[in-house]
Image (tube, grey):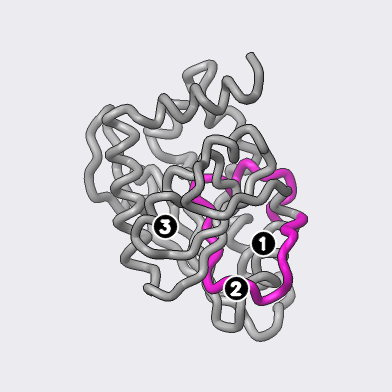
Amino acid sequence: MQSSDKAARYLKSCESTFWEKVFTAELDYLLQQLKTDDEILSVGCGPAIMESSLASKGFMVVGLDVSREALACAGDAIRAVAASAEEMPFPDASFDVVLYIASLQFIDDYRKSLERTAQVLRPGGRMIAMLLNPASQFFKTRYDTTDSYVRKLKHTDLQAIEQSASVWLQTEGDYFLGIDGEELFPCTDPDKAALYILKGVKRHEPVAMS
């Protein structure tokens, strides 16, 4: 199957009632975190489903993805840039917020990506990274499915990711969103929540890892 066909197939699958509920829950969370004048970079945006929704709310959004085929499905609501997360082609201090919507764990070198995140953020800028929680039943069930996207995950150690982020950002995290089959419910249990949301504010200076 060609890459363009894969992108179109993925976009079609996202139209299911289940994924629409997931995207709505994630969008509601983001809207509580964002400020109306935020200029946003979304890293690993794919076909930019969430990013287009943010743009429809009035946000200026740039979407970055390594796949040109996925970006071709993004439409015109956002500015789309084809590049790797490790080599974000933007000047320093370009954005108020950098988002990773279930994308950071799929990036080859997340440490380099986090370093670039801090560089492209303005002073006081924020990062919001939605991470899949490997301890959750949602993750385990999906992983047991041979062709599931979660099998492409490259990084599952949430603590290591947060520790790396803390070099560049003052971090905090929230467990978020319980998923049981097709049902969604509020959940902050580390063993049950499908997502761990890592948030950070850019430091004035990086700190050494302990």
| Marks 3/2: CA–CA distance | 26 Å
Residue 197 vertical position relative to residue 107 in the rendered view, above or below: below
Which numbered disc covers residue 55?
3
> Cβ–Cβ below 8 Å for labels 1 and 2?
yes
The residue carrying mark 2 is 169
Q: Is residue 110 magenta?
A: yes
Q: Nearer the viewer, residue 108 or 1?
A: 1
| Marks 1/3: CA–CA distance | 24 Å
**Amino acid type of the residue that numbered disc 2 sits on in the rendered structure:** Leu
The residue carrying mark 1 is 114
Looking at the image, is mark 1 or mark 3 earlier in the sequence?
3
Classify the position of the N terminus by image quarter: top right
Looking at the image, is mark 3 or mark 2 earlier in the sequence?
3
Mark in front: 3 vs 2: 3
Residue 133 vertical position relative to residue 87 in the rendered view, above or below: above
Residue drawn at (65%, 85%) of the image: 204
| Marks 1/2: CA–CA distance | 9 Å
What is the secondary structure assignment of the residue under circle 1? helix
Q: Which residues are magenta?
A: 87-111
**Amino acid type of the residue that numbered disc 1 sits on in the rendered structure:** Leu
Furthest-front residue in view?
76
**Amino acid type of the residue that numbered disc 3 sits on in the rendered structure:** Ala
What is the secondary structure assignment of the residue under circle 2? strand
Residue drawn at (51%, 57%) of the image: 129
> Cβ–Cβ below 8 Å for labels 1 and 3?
no
Residue 163 coordinates in the image, percent (x, y): 62, 63
